[in-house]
């Protein structure tokens, strides 16, 4: 079939039209020609708690050791009342001596009482001051409140004021109010322990003074500490008795590359190698100087982590257990009542069965407590949380295109949005700016997307049903899709 001149001219014009459009699209660097992006795969920005951590190992050790002395100028030593390895409690008798000069000994004990009174008053004032501090909702008002609090005129001495100021500075620097509350609680807990220690020392001195007044010649010295007696000087050389604290800490070492990441007050999760028990703690201190400096090899920096107060953990677990048991009891009671109504029989209680069950429960609890008991020398695996972000906007690493994402807008357009990333955890990336939870992003094929442009998605036949096909819009939407292609 021969083409007429008119047909040839039409064919040439059509080819020129196509080539011109292709050329325009090719040289359209500013993307003024609207293109449609076909999205085959997309995903949603999700919400997740993100954190970075440092993994290391540690060993349990006594938190501190305390020394008890004997001033032989006050009298003649009589006898020890404890043995090495023995567990002692505050107020328990340690040793006794016979005084040489009643008035001199009484004056010294009264001086110690007066000193302890002042220290106790200062600690109580510090606790009251910190308890009155309200964690501000915004960090902008925190410094003014901290300065106002640290300048209060009360019975707090200079050392306590300095410590309070240090804790307040820590609280005003953190962005998370929960972390600030944790710092506040830790300070109060430490001060309460210190207060209990001073009160125990005061009781010990008071008892010695009372005994001296009663006998006129003999004084029995009581322990102001709870712990284990690890050394007794039979030769009466100082220290006369060494008591290791009953509280345990975790001691470990950090590698050079991890040292700058770890700071006091960071949370640490502790898993015991001996019994797989899990504890939570806080980094207490990190040494600035390595345990050994050498040109060869890598330096290691010692650190200490404290275990969180077990009473708080037990209270939380106990409250959860009580709620669970109450719920179970209510369900069992309702079930028994329904059965009684159906059968017409009363609720029978077998007291002997209940008692045996309670005994078994107590035995199981004691067994679990014994298995979970911690001892000095136990080794542990540590996970130190160096950075964390709660309820963060998160995408998978593969969903990023260079330093941005392809954001699908509600208007039906796709744009490449630059983003700032935060914490990286496994294959997940925190988006700190540029995307929010719930937004949709295109992930395939990224190399064919243009920004900005309208987009279409592949037809998902599985979502079609008779109800949707009866809609008046389905044919119009289908044609729009074809035309957009």
Image (cartoon, grey):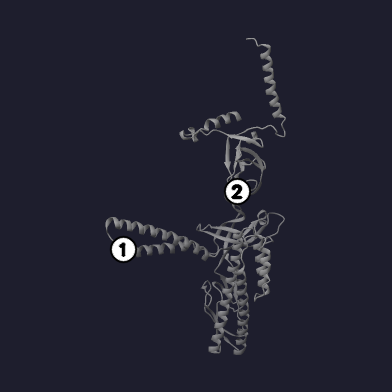
Lower position in the chain sequence, tag 2 or tag 1: 1
- Comparing 324 with 39, the one in front is 39
Q: Residues within 10 Å of mark 1 (few under 14, many from 20)?
A: few
Q: Residues within 10 Å of mark 2 (few under 14, many from 20)?
A: many
- Residue located 69% across and 17% down the image: 12
Residue occupying the far top of the picture: 2
Q: Secondary structure at mark 2?
A: strand
Q: Is residue 286 visible?
A: no
Residue 182 location (% of width, % of height): 59, 62
Residue hosting label 1: 350
Residue hosting label 2: 393
Q: In the displayed structure, would residue 429 be above or below residue 302?
A: above
Residue 10 location (% of width, % of height): 67, 17
Q: Quadrant of the C terminus?
A: top right
Count the numbered circles shown.
2
Judge from the rendering whether residue 483 lies leftward or rightward of residue 147; answer left or right.
Answer: left
Distance between the alpha carbons at the discs numbered 2 and 1: 55 Å
Q: In the displayed structure, would residue 218 be above or below residue 31?
A: below
Q: Secondary structure at mark 1?
A: loop
The disc placed on residue 174 is none
- Residue located 55% across and 31% down the image: 476
Q: In the displayed structure, would residue 155 be above or below residue 462?
A: below
Residue 389 location (% of width, % of height): 61, 53
Residue 211 location (% of width, % of height): 54, 86
């Amino acid at each position: 079939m021969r083409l007429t001149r008119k047909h040839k001219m039409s064919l040439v014009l059509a080819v020129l039209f196509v080539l011109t459009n292709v050329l325009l699209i090719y040289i359209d660097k500013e993307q003024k020609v609207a293109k449609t992006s076909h999205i085959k795969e997309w995903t949603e920005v999700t919400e997740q708690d993100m954190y970075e951590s440092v993994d290391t190992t540690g060993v349990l050790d006594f938190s501190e050791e305390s020394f008890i002395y004997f001033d032989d100028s006050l009298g003649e030593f009589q006898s020890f009342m404890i043995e090495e390895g023995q567990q002692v409690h505050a107020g328990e008798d340690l040793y006794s001596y016979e005084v040489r000069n009643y008035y001199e000994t009484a004056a010294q004990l009264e001086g110690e009482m007066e000193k302890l009174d002042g220290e106790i008053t200062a600690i109580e004032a510090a606790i009251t001051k910190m308890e009155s501090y309200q964690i501000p909702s915004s960090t902008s008002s925190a410094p003014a409140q901290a300065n106002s609090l640290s300048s209060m005129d009360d019975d707090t001495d200079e050392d306590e004021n300095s410590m309070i100021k240090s804790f307040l500075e820590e609280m005003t620097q953190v962005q998370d109010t929960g972390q600030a509350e944790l710092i506040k609680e830790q300070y109060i807990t430490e001060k309460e322990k210190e207060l209990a220690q001073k009160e125990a020392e005061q009781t010990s001195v008071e008892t010695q003074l009372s005994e001296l007044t009663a006998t006129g010649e003999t004084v029995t010295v009581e322990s102001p500490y709870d712990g284990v007696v690890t050394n007794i000087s039979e030769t009466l050389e100082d220290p006369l008795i060494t008591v290791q604290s009953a509280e345990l800490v975790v001691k470990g070492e950090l590698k050079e590359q991890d040292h700058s990441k770890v700071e006091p007050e960071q949370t640490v999760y502790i898993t015991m190698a001996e019994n797989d028990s899990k504890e939570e703690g806080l980094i207490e201190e990190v040494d600035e100087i390595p345990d050994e400096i050498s040109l060869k090899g890598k330096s290691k920096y010692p650190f200490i982590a404290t275990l969180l107060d077990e009473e708080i953990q037990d209270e939380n677990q106990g409250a959860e257990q009580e709620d669970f048991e109450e719920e179970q009891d209510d369900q069992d009671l309702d079930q028994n009542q329904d059965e009684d109504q159906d059968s017409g029989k009363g609720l029978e209680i077998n007291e002997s069965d209940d008692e045996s069950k309670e005994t078994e429960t107590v035995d199981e609890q004691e067994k679990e407590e014994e298995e979970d008991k911690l001892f000095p020398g136990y080794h542990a695996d540590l996970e130190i949380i160096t950075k964390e972000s709660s309820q963060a906007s998160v995408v998978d690493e593969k969903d990023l295109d260079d330093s941005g994402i392809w954001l699908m807008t509600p208007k039906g357009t796709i744009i490449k949005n630059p983003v700032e990333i935060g914490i990286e955890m496994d294959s997940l990336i925190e988006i700190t700016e540029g995307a929010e939870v719930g937004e949709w992003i295109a992930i395939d094929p990224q190399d064919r997307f243009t920004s900005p442009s309208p987009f279409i998605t592949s037809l998902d036949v599985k979502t079609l049903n008779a109800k949707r096909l009866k809609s008046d819009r389905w044919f119009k939407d289908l044609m729009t899709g074809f035309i957009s292609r």
